Amino acid sequence: MTGDPEALEPHELATLFALTEAANLLQHQVEQHLRAEGDLSYVQFQLLARLASTDGPLTMTQLADGVVYSRSGLTYQAGLLEQRGLITRGPSPDDERATLVAATDEGRALVEAILPGHVQVARRMLFDPLSADDVRRLGDVMGRVRDHMRAQPPRSAAPRRRAARPAPER
């Protein structure tokens, strides 16, 4: 023990570094595949795959929450996908503040074309070195971690820090 209650234990720090490095290596390989096969960023693929897997449109807020991306960043990425004809955006008939987003036939076709290679990358990089039991345990552990993280308020909902104001002069 380091004596500092805020410090991580050596095994915790090693776990954090291993997780971060593995996630970065996996994401890099996935990004390379997505760029080569579909000229998509990882975030664009997440948005498009999520939309392609739904029966109807989603709101921009649903998309932002689902892919853990800022609303302004999502608006930009959705604009790029819309320019390519992969998604459509339009006002919600039920809520004037909401924008509905849906995958086009071209967007769905691109996801279908990219998905087999995406699965190969995930299998090669993540699942091949693991047994079936390892995969179940990893899924259980990461599911708990994800659920814990999602239970925390999103940054956009967290209270803002107020700037310290100088004391009034007397």
Image: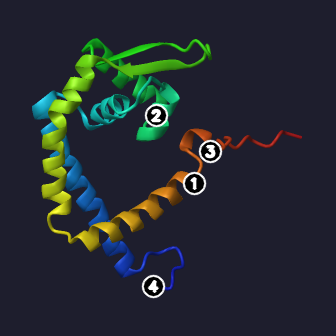
- Classify mark 4: helix, strand or loop: loop
Closer-to-camera residue (19/136): 136
How many angstroms separate mark 2 from mark 3 (CA)? Answer: 16 Å
Question: Quick check: 135 above or below 80?
Answer: below
How many angstroms separate mark 2 from mark 1 (CA)? Answer: 16 Å
For residue 38, what is the image quadrant?
A: top left
Residue at 29% across / 31% down in the picture? Answer: 44
Which residue type does callout 1 highlight?
A: Ala
Question: Quick check: 163 above or below 72?
Answer: below
**Residue 55 image position (x, y, % from top left):** 41, 27
- Foreground tag (4 vs 1): 1
How many marks the image carries: the answer is 4
Quickly name the residue at label 1.
Answer: 151
How many angstroms separate mark 2 from mark 4 (CA)? Answer: 39 Å
The first of marks 4 and 3 along the sequence is 4
Question: Quick check: 17 above or below 3?
Answer: above
For residue 68, what is the image quadrant?
A: top left
Residue at 20% across / 26% down in the picture? Answer: 110
How many angstroms separate mark 4 from mark 3 (CA)? Answer: 31 Å
Report if the CB atoms under discs 3 and 1 are less than 8 Å apart: no
Give the number of the disc on residue 126.
none
Can residue 152 be spotted in the picture?
Answer: yes
Report if the CB atoms under discs 2 and 4 are less than 8 Å apart: no
Give the residue at the far front of this rendering.
55
Quickly name the residue at label 4.
Answer: 2
Report if the CB atoms under discs 4 and 1 are less than 8 Å apart: no
Which residue type does callout 3 highlight?
A: Ala
Which residue type does callout 2 highlight?
A: Ala
**Residue 106 image position (x, y, % from top left):** 23, 18
How many angstroms separate mark 4 from mark 1 (CA)? Answer: 29 Å
